[in-house]
Amino acid sequence: MKILVTGGAGFIGSAVIRNIIDNTQDSVVNVDSLTYAGNLESLSLIEDSERYAFEKVDICNRAELERVFSTHKPDAVMHLAAESHVDRSIDGPAAFIETNIVGTYTLLEATRSYWSTLSQDKKDAFRFHHISTDEVYGDLEGTDDLFTETTSYEPSSPY
Ligand SMILES: NC(=O)c1ccc[n+]([C@@H]2O[C@H](COP(=O)([O-])OP(=O)(O)OC[C@H]3O[C@@H](n4cnc5c(N)ncnc54)[C@H](O)[C@@H]3O)[C@@H](O)[C@H]2O)c1
């Protein structure tokens, strides 16, 4: 498979990419705009792999995302790019609304546009995996309470 990972220069995304390159035969294209939270040194051990490519692209940029999809033709998306530090959202929510909401929406639309061009087999196999946080679903009531795939969003902050 070729997996498009967003936010691959971040804390979790870089570990995901190192794991894919080290422990599978899959390829990765890392889409990251390198905000203050991104650090390519986290990928220094795998950056020379023929199965790794880096695209410095903002997920809010639809035209650039379409270029990335048509160049790399991924089989799946793992979406980790985010403004991820909740405390920063209290003082400055704008970047959170841009990346977490507008950026996720733009990535979903670019993915759908690309997905619609695939063969039926590839459409059926394609996955969009959004790695996010419990913050978007609000609070659980107790230890028996669970979120499911049909749980509605109930965010408790701009984060
Ligand atoms: N770190 C944790 O403990 C934790 C726990 C639960 C959930 N999460 C969630 O997992 C996801 C990843 O978390 P993380 O800790 O790796 O985050 P991080 O802040 O370490 O990394 C985020 C990455 O996204 C990139 N990025 C930010 N805005 C971008 C944009 N507009 N376009 C392209 N790239 C952009 C940054 O450059 C950075 O490399 C987030 O959604 C976060 O909420 C993290």
Image (cartoon, rainbow, N blue to C red):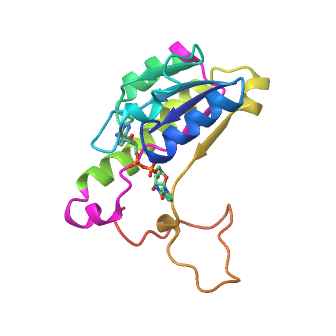
Question: Along the horizontal axis of the image, is 109 left or right of 2?
Answer: left
Region of the chain picked out in magenta, as a range = 71-93
Dividing the image into 4 quarters, which one contains the N terminus? top right
Question: Along the horizontal axis of the image, is 128 left or right of 155?
Answer: right
Q: Which quadrant would residue 81 be assigned to in this image? A: top left
Residue at 25% x, 59% y is 93
Q: Which quadrant would residue 73 be assigned to in this image? A: top right
Q: How many discs mark residues in the rendered view?
A: 0
Residue at 36% x, 69% y is 157
Residue at 28% x, 62% y is 89
Looking at the image, is 78 positioned above or below residue 55? below
Dividing the image into 4 quarters, which one contains the C terminus? bottom left
Question: Looking at the image, which is closer to me, 117 or 134?
Answer: 134
Question: Along the horizontal axis of the image, is 24 left or right of 86?
Answer: right
Looking at the image, is 135 positioned above or below residue 45? below
Residue 90 is covered by the magenta coloring: yes
Looking at the image, is 43 positioned above or below residue 97? above
Q: Position of residue 49 (x, y in %)?
A: 56, 17
Q: Position of residue 74 (x, y in %)?
A: 61, 23
Question: Looking at the image, which is closer to me, 40 or 26?
Answer: 40
Question: Along the horizontal axis of the image, is 99 left or right of 77?
Answer: left
Residue farthest to the bottom, as pictured? 142
Q: Position of residue 35 (x, y in %)?
A: 29, 40
Residue farthest to the front, as pictured? 45
Residue 152 is covered by the magenta coloring: no
Residue farthest to the right, as pictured? 121
Q: Position of residue 30 (x, y in %)?
A: 48, 28
Residue at 44% x, 44% y is 104
